[in-house]
Amino acid sequence: MSNLKEIRTRIASVKSTKQITSAMKMVSAAKLKKAQDAVINLRPYAEKLHHILFDINQSIKQEDENIYSRKGIKKSVLIVSVTSNKGLCGAFNANVSKQVSRLINDDLIRKYERENIWIYSIGKKGTEFYQAGKFNIFKYNNEILDKLNFDNAVPLIEEIMNCYVTKRFDKIVVVYNRFKNAGVQILKTEKYLPIELPKGDVLDEHMNYIFEPTKENIIHELIPKSLKIQLYDVLLESLAAEHGARMTAMHKATDNATALIRNLQLHYNKARQTAITNEILEIVGGAEALSK
């Protein structure tokens, strides 16, 4: 790359890319703060709700299975895949898509026929991957992530829950990235339905609940509410993880662009120095030729 014009063009191009990646990093950082606050605010509520459900369920003698805990049926399975609508976030989307593929080919294929393994894709990048790979796509929803809040998420969550209640699927699994911090996302594969609540005959001695109307009615109200919160938490975790992954990826891209500009500038200076030296030699050579 000895041509000075080519080097200047390359430097200008990399500087432009650096400005874009730096801006995207700042945008992702701002979005991450909002998404992280939403995750942190929801976690205590979700944990307390699950704790209450755990305690109440210990004191109920459940002879019959409820509609969210059928057992012994292995006909069809639904995988809820949560990715993002946009790229430039490192391996965020690829990790989920590859995990879904491994889950199907290494685990579920042993228990279910391939035509009975379906995917509910949330996120454009995952949907594109599954369509290209000719996976069985039950449905997809790419719009929910653009304006994520509980009210907007409820119809989607209820639709997924009804897939189990109506016996369209006998098992639902969720694959997503859980947010840990801005630089770390934990790939998770969790069984969503059927639920498995611990059973017991003795009520926790530390419990101090007054039940109205009955414990059985309350737990049947809490189970769907807990399921909605659980899946909403998955969406929030994935969204926060996405912004963290994109911020990290853009930070690395900006650093790489800075290093590349430095190397190109050094190469440009060397090439320019060589060109100037050659011009001086040509001038000196011409002057000597004229003096003879």
Image: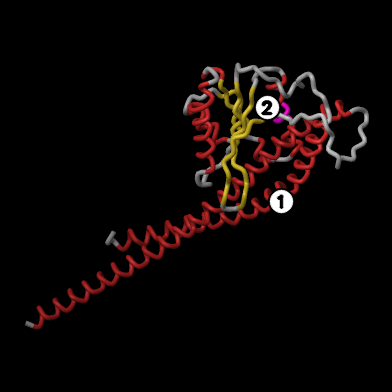
Amino acid carrying mark 1 in the image: Asp
- Looking at the picture, which amino acid does disc 2 mark? Leu
Expressed as whole percent of the image width and height from the top left, the position of residue 284 reads: 16, 79
Q: On residue 225, which mark appears?
A: none
> Does residue 215 appear in this view?
yes
Q: Secondary structure at mark 2?
A: strand
Sooner in the amino-acid sequence: mark 1 or mark 2: 1
Residue 156 belongs to the span the image colors magenta: yes
Q: Main secondary structure of the magenta part?
A: helix
Task: Name the spot of residue 122 as percent of width and height, x first.
Answer: 61, 33
Closer-to-camera residue (151/36): 36
Which residue corresponds to the image point at 61% horizontal and 18% vertical from the top-left?
74
Q: Residue furthest left?
A: 292
Location of residue 72 (image quadrant): top right
> Badge 1 is on which residue?
37
Q: What span is in magenta?
A: 155-159
Which mark is nearer the camera, 1 or 2?
A: 2
Residue ID at (68%, 25%): 194
Q: CA distance from mark 1 to mark 2?
A: 28 Å
Left or right side of 200 for 290: left
* Quarter the C terminus occupies: bottom left
- Left or right of residue 30: residue 124: left
Say left or right for 208 vs 76. Answer: right
Dot 1: what SS? helix
Residue where numbered disc 2 is placed: 193
Q: Residue furthest bottom?
A: 291
Give the answer, above or below, for where 177 lies relative to 3: above
Q: Decide if residue 221 is in sight here.
A: no
Q: Quadrant of the N terminus?
A: bottom left
For this view, does 178 lie left or right of residue 263? right
